[in-house]
Amino acid sequence: MKRFLHVKNVPKLYCANVDSFKYSKTVPTHELLTRLNYISHPKAGLVNWLPAGLSSMNKISNVVRKRMNEIDFEELGLSLISHNSSWKKTGRWETGLEFFKLDGKEYLLVPTAEEEITNHVASHLTSYKNLPLLYYQINPKFRNEKRPRSGLLRGKEFIMKDAYSFDIDEKSAMTTYNNVIGAYTRIFQDLRLPFTKAAADTGEIGGSLSHEWHYLHETGEDTVFSCDNCGSVSNVEKTLSFPVEETEVADVSVTYFMTKDKSTLVCAYYPKDRELQPNFVKNEVPDLNVHITDQELILAEFSDPDTLISKKIIRIMDARLNSRSNFPDFPISFINRSLITTLSDIPIVSAEEFEICGECEDGKLHGNRAIEIGHTFYLGDKYSKPLGCSVEVPVGNKTERKDLMMGCYGIGVSRIIASIGEINKDDKGLNWPRIVAPWEVTVVEAGNGNKEFEEVYRYLNQAGLDYRADNRPKVGLGKKINQSNLMGIPITVILGKKFPIIELEIRGKKYGDSWKQVYESRDFEWEVEYENGQDIKHFVHKDGLSRALEGLLEDM
Ligand SMILES: [Zn+2]
């Protein structure tokens, strides 16, 4: 009886749109991914994941899963639709300008899941002995991006790994936070993605400790500064800086803020040609409401001479200003000067290249464009308190109800594909590390349908190798090899006239040399062709094919 042979083929629409396409390294990565049918965009900001793209995405997800499972996080899947009640309790319903609020505004498509996961824990946790509770999910998130871009960096929908931790106290929450930092380091190393971990502002999510994980690239929309003296790395919203030397600032801008209780007017003065960072102002006045920015509305609160006596005014002068600077007129004429406090030499604008580091006040800052690929936050009780997520804890011979201490941790899975694609692109096209490639080996045949070749597919199936056969009729051998290279597949296996000797063409970047051990201990025919010291072709007897492939892929 003949055994059934299943050959894994390339996707049906593999390279269907590339015939008229002239590749050059300057083609943007998202355009390349679209052209090669990894993804498609039905509308700006929306993404369809096609077979090759979904395969790469699943591989990244599996790396994330493995590393999160290793630190005892449990995977779950929360609903992608959330009711507004908990978002109102945490105060995020009104401030979430980019929320996808559904018809009737009672529900939203989830942008993140702090509210839902906190509700889950609040209603299911029965004993402090079950802590910590550690969860993650990998699924779509939504953001009503008003100016969506093509590609995977700024869309209305994206795939995210979001994780949440619930601990009994801050000490244990810090242990969890550090475990996640370890897992993130391993994830980005596994993905061969060079990364920078930067101290970050906690922004809308809140909490007190936060890091952004970036990879540095000129196409990035974020800026990360590093100091050449103390080594601190932070994003632009967190980088405090001082001018190199006293500079003459001619024109001064002012932006007004007020405190949440509307009792204090805060006037932030800074050089006209620089960008104000409102959160630096908030560092000085913690009660500041950075969401109210309407200048007229703010000044109107301080326009009545009768109530002004009960109010305060704080002037904050950026470190680049001095008394010779040209300040705008003060908007309130009837002011009693005893109401005014002035703070000077405070850095409140975005840092610039080569300014002095605000951390050590010694080194110079160096800026790099970067793409954010992950974010970690210590949240404390910011969500557990309003949502009543607490547990009875024994204290002496009594018990006490304590709010749980939370953390949240994101990784932009769909962004990572774009990032890895971008950094590994070369003059032949994409070039994936093995762990992200949609498949690891493309098999092409010179002269289709040679019965002897069936044996090769049996070997590959038995060895569990991640191959796809390109048996498209009427497509020439050379074109098949070029297209596999353009797709970024690490190795092409060519079955031809020399069979049972099989040609392997190496495309993938080598991160090691461990294949040489397999080569030295071979008991089958195996020749290697080098170019500029690189092994570019291998000629291997069919009996050793799967061992040679496994050895070579190990380094990719
Ligand atoms: Zn420094």
Image (tube, rainbow, N blue to C red):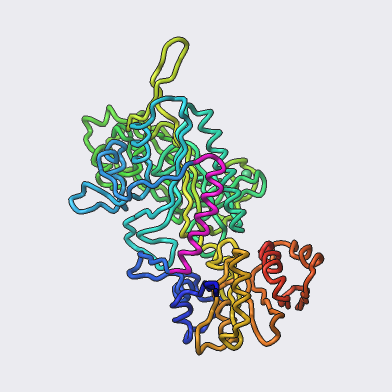
Q: Is residue 67 magenta?
A: yes
Q: Residue at x 78, y 62 (%)?
A: 517
Type of secondary structure dominating the magenta stretch: helix
Apparent side of residue 141 relative to residue 532 in the rendered image (left or right): left
Position above or below: 71 against 5: above
Please tell me which residue is depicted at 38% across the width and 26% down the height of the picture: 126
Q: What is the tally of numbered marks visible in this picture? A: 0
- 281, above or below 41, in the image: above
Q: Is residue 503 magenta?
A: no
> Among all residues in the image, which is located at the extreme right?
520
Which residue is more in the foreground, 97 or 360? 97
Q: Please give left or right for residue 463 compared with residue 261 in the image.
A: right
Which is nearer the eye, 415 or 548?
548
Report ligand 1 position as a quadrant.
Answer: top right
* Residue furthest to the front: 1
Q: Name the residue: 47% across, 87% down.
A: 20
x, y percent for residue 412: 47, 54
Quadrant where the image shows the C terminus:
bottom right
Looking at the rendering, in which quadrant would you find the N terminus?
bottom right
From the top left corner, tell me how far across and down residue 74 is, in percent.
47, 42
Residue numbers of the magenta segment? 51-73
User: Residue 316: horizontal and vertical position, in percent?
Assistant: 43, 39
